[in-house]
């Protein structure tokens, strides 16, 4: 991806929070689980949450060939894909200066269909690895019918920007004298104890990746 | 809001997961902290994360009058606003049937600017109450300059749909015999211990709402 902003990725508001560093972008994409996909149908914007996976500079989404979203994207329309990680609530001394700490990525482009069976399978593995590393090797892989019944689209991570806010509230100078507690409430996406399916075979151990599931950036490129 | 879907809100994929019940929609909106706002500029979709507040059947967003997003929405263009709560990872016995448990709302409409100072202040209070209940009464309220320097837009919660997946994986019948652990890893947005701003006055106690911050739906209408 390019290190300089384009007219679309140039962050307009509070530009000092922007980054066009691919590693920053990849880290945020790798930690997120759900993206919000924006596309236009007859002038009407749609924003649909969906899961995704990343392999180097490509981001993959997938689903049923009957999906309106995927069918629309498959036509090569412009897409805006956004991933947001909420890191904390920022409590200032004044209502006006309350804020949130976050890391987000906004990616523009057009999707291309993945038809090659090998790339398709690799994309689906990346998809599973993204959500639960180590899972792919333990489950039944897609059979030919399932593979044929899955539409996989790729989006190049070429035109993207990250935006990050960290740190304490920034109050108006005169407000620091107010007797109002100020600071951050950190927020994390955390996993609770896994819930086994009632129909699990007896004596199956809960896999360690499920017991100790943690969401952290896994950027490897 | 209407209890029946419109051509825009009609859920296309897996329609049995859809709901057009205002209470369901309100509960999801009240638990969420960030929405993803979709709008179109010269055919190009943009999806921008932003905070919001709700008062009865209106959803408020706000920000700087210099914001491209708010300036665009202020022109009365079509908006799609989406809120997604991720509740869990659903681990099936086959790669194909992996899924996620979630609750999401997709809302369509056009924004209207809130100019009346009383409604504007009420909206900003709703905004703060939405994120940290009880905070508003303890902080310095907006002064006239801050109020004038904040653009507040309202979006009627009239045309919306919710979509919800809960429960265990649904595997292909023959896969239930596989010796693969299956179930759900529940996910929650949780708060860590509050971090006081270094410039907090001494002897200020951490407010109880910050110590025990919990994100739960607070639907009161």
Image: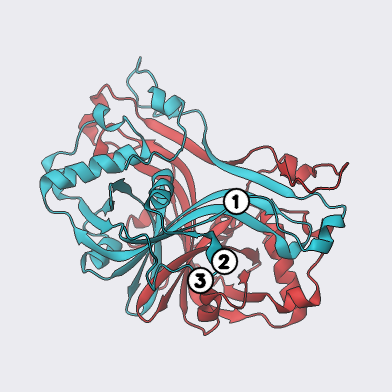
Chain colours: A cyan, B red
The residue under the point 55% across, 53% down is: A102
What crowding class fits label 2: few (fewer than 14 Cα within 10 Å), some (14-19), or many (20 or more)? few
User: Separation of disc 1 and disc 2 at Cα?
Assistant: 13 Å
- Sequence-wise, the earlier of marks 3 and 1 is 3
Expressed as whole percent of the image width and height from the top left, the position of residue B97 reads 28, 40
Say which residue label 1 marks: A166
**Outermost residue toward the front in this view:** A4
Image side of residue A218 versus residue B86, left or right: left
Q: Foreground: B200 or B76?
A: B200
Q: Which residue is mark 2?
A: A14
Q: Which residue is mark 3?
A: A12
Subunit bearing disc 1: A
Q: Quadrant of residue B172?
A: top left
Most extreme residue toward the top is: A203
Does residue B27 appear anywhere in the picture? Answer: yes
Q: Please indicate whether residue B145 sits to the left or right of residue B186 in the image.
A: right
């Amino acid at each position: 991806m390019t290190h300089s902003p384009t007219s679309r990725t140039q962050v307009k508001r509070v530009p000092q929070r922007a980054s066009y560093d691919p590693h920053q972008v990849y880290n945020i994409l790798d930690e997120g689980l759900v993206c919000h996909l924006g596309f236009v149908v007859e002038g009407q914007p749609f924003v649909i949450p969906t899961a995704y996976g990343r392999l180097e500079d490509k981001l993959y989404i997938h689903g049923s060939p009957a999906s309106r979203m995927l069918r629309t994207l498959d036509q090569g329309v412009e897409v805006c894909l956004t991933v947001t990680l909420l890191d904390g609530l920022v409590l200032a001394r004044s209502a006006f200066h309350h804020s949130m700490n976050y890391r987000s990525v906004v990616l523009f482009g057009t999707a291309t269909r993945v038809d090659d069976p090998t790339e398709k399978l690799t994309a689906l593995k990346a998809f599973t690895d993204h959500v639960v590393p180590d899972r792919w090797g333990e489950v039944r892989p897609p059979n030919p019918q399932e593979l044929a019944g899955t539409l996989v689209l790729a989006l190049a991570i070429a035109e993207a920007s990250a935006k990050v806010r960290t740190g304490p509230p920034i109050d108006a100078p005169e407000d620091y004298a107010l007797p109002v507690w100020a600071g951050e409430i950190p927020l994390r996406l955390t996993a609770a104890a896994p819930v086994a399916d009632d129909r699990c075979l007896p004596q199956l151990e809960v896999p360690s990746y499920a017991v100790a599931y943690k969401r952290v950036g896994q950027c490897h490129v």
